Amino acid sequence: MRDHQQGQGSAAFTDNTGNAGELHQDIAADGDHSDGPAHLTDNHGHRIADNQNSLRAGTRGPTLLEDFVLREKIFHFDHERIPERIVHARGSGAHGTFEVTRAIPEWTRAGLFQEVGTTCPVFVRFSTVAGGAGSVDTPRDVRGFAVKLYTQEGNWDLVGNNIPVFFIQDAIKFPDLVHSVKMEADRGYPQAASAHDTFWDFVSLMPETMHMVMWAMSDRGIPRSLRMIEGFGVHTFRFINAEGEGRFVKFHWKPVLGLQSTTWDEAVKIAGADPDFHRRDLWEAIDAGDFPQWDLGVQIFDEAWAAKQPYDVLDATKLIPEEEIPVEVIGRMTLNRNVDNFFAETEQVAFLPTNILPGIDFSNDPLLQGRLFSYLDTQKSRLGTTNFHQIPINAPKCPFHNMQRDGMMQTLVPKGRANYEPNTLAQAGEDGGPRACPETGFSSFRENGERNDPTEKLRVRPETFADHYSQARMFYLSQTENEQAHIASAIVFELSKVSIPHIPTAVIARLRNIDEDLAKRVAEGLGIDLPKKAKAAKEPVDLGTSDALSIQKNAKATLEGRKVGILFDEGSNKETIDTLVADIEKAGGTSFLVAPKIGPLKVKGGTLKADGQLAGTPSVMFDAVVAILMPERAEKLAQDVGAVAWFADAWFHCKTIGACGGTRKHLLPKANIEPDDGIVDPEDFMKTGAIRHWHREPKVRDLA
Ligand code: HDD
């Protein structure tokens, strides 16, 4: 007898007849193929003798229907695709662990948070929202940040974004929002872009979008790396402790590498140079053992505090400033393993906001309430069966028992007759199956004292949801001057792609409620007259500013997780390059050697091979660049427009440039680069590192 579980082998494939949750190892008939690869079989275990020629009637005759090998292979191939996600279709996933760093039994009875050091496995999927599965990684867009924590009390899915607020307040508007931002219905474009008529038409009619529009048009919409984004649960949730006391909670993921974004010009160029920039970056970092980490933080507050705020905490278009309720760190997540199979894991993972733990609960946020239906529903259409929870990536890692049976693709084999509850089968000596557990099971929080009268049925939005501008204004005013300029030019760019003239006018009319100067800049940028201010449902109030909302104010001067491009050529000094590479690595960064030819090239002290050819490796791929060139090679490269652009771009994108004498003499002047504190000698590069020199920006582009 051979044992499928114990089978050994170098090649692995999925045994389609296996039990749920297990990827079976390949098995040769005798369980041993140490002297070569496993035998190729069809999906039913029959060995295949010839995988190159179909079965034909005669050497030149037609193919025979009897050829089950051919038919099965093509049949399976024809059905390999499943519907892509209606939103967040393009994503990258990774496995990891979550560890509790602060026990919080006073806030929640969730088993996960009772003791410091408790860990659980996690799976995270990052995504763009608007583009299809085959689109690019760096469009201006929101990034999905969905985390599945496989706890001992069941799966907890925190399905968030990298922006703490949402476009709309009520789930009933979600299909309209998504239709408007995706490619336009008649022409099927633009792909992965919000810069078009229908999205801005929707925005212009929906003032509640304005706060998130500010975020999406800011540098948050064009992140440098998925490892450098924040994640937010967005909604207000509940924590409930063992005494049954409830508190409101907002969830935050803070990247240990800090926040970093690209510039718009960079993002556009990266899209061409490497459409997979973000997924490659994530994969390579994990592969190299540079595991990205995030701290899980919470903002905790109660109903009495919430009632005093000038906005409603159940309104997903509002955030709670960290200056008012600090984010308290309770755990750390580390992503430490790439997926083995993109389809089986990243594509088939099914997140459900309804996956919640005893001790955590929903709030009455009407956006969240709609999500509680939508995700379960969409999984059936994407994965084809109500048994999608049995797919290994979705299955809980704790025991699960219930009376749900059958359905397409049932891969478990429930035993016995107990498929209903209650039953008395146990009294007859049979397995009576599981029972509900009131003490430890999930129970909904009793919302005493919430500002809500559940006796009325109403299709209304509360007055407390009416202020659409105050927080949008706070966000804008909290940005640095450069960041404000980025927002203004992003809106100008997007609206310049809108062909219906009244739409930009309507958007600017709304911007006047956020900031007059911003509205003026956008109007001037588009060459249209400043329209009358749009009437606000509720006049905005002054909320001051919050430094936590700015990326630049919180920039980390670090090389950790950053990538440095080192340009060399024949004759460059190997020792200088080797030392720099070692120093960068010691500081937690990675380096990438670029040369006009891959080589190996003869350099001083030996030979060196480049990781990338200059023509195919623009400087937008890096956080900083260094050039170590012989003067005559620098002079020659100065004749090459591509090489000059390599420096011009780094300069334009405010990056540090480590430049040797030859580079300073021949290449930098050609690229119109003036010395500043971001242009350093290669030997001094480590002192400056990969920070962006934003003070340079007014010199390289018009920020007005
Ligand atoms: Fe959603 C996917 C995040 C509102 C309906 N959403 C999806 C994903 C993320 C979010 C990260 C991708 C999950 C994955 O990687 O598989 N969605 C959000 C956030 C929202 C939000 C942060 C607001 C705070 N979503 C929202 C609403 C609805 C949906 C209001 C519907 C009423 N979302 C879906 C969906 C998706 C989805 C259609 C598509 C694929 C999927 O669920 O599994 O059900």
Image (cartoon, helix red, strand yellow):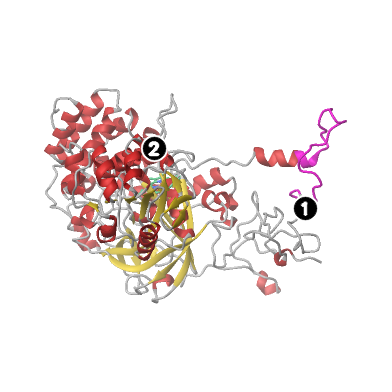
Rendering coords of residue 494 (x, y %) = 28, 33
103 or 29, which is in the foreground? 29
Residue 267 in picture, x, y percent from top left = 34, 41
Residue at image location 60% in from the left, 63% down from the top: 421
First in sequence: mark 1 vs mark 2: 1
Task: Say which mark, if any, is on residue 45.
Answer: 1
- Disc ID at residue 297: none
Q: Is residue 395 above or below residue 192?
A: below
Q: Residues within 10 Å of mark 1 (few under 14, many from 20)?
A: some
Tag 2: Cα neighbours inside 10 Å, few (<14), some, or many (≥20)? some
- Please identify the quadrant where the C terminus is shown: top left
Residue numbers of the magenta segment = 42-70
Using the image as rendered, state which of residue 489 and residue 678 is in the foreground: 678
Q: Pointer 2: what residue?
A: 178
CB contact under 8 Å: marks 1 and 2: no
| Residue 324 belongs to magenta span | no
Instruction: Report x, y in % for residue 78.
Output: 65, 37
Q: How many marks?
A: 2
Q: Can residue 544 be seen in the rendering of this structure?
A: yes
Dominant SS type (magenta): loop
- Left or right: 217 as drawn, with respect to 388: left
Q: Residue at x 67, y 54 (%)?
A: 14
Place of residue 586 in the rendered image (x, y in percent of width and height, measured from the top left): 37, 66
Residue 550 visible within the image = no
- CB at mark 2 closer than 8 A to ligand 1? yes
Local SS, label 2: helix
Q: Which quarter of the picture shows residue 248?
A: bottom left
Residue 49 located within the stretch drawn in magenta = yes
Secondary structure beneath disc 1? loop
Q: Could you tell me how far apart the alpha carbons at marks 1 and 2 are, in whole angstroms?
A: 45 Å
Is 370 placed left or right of 36 in the picture? left
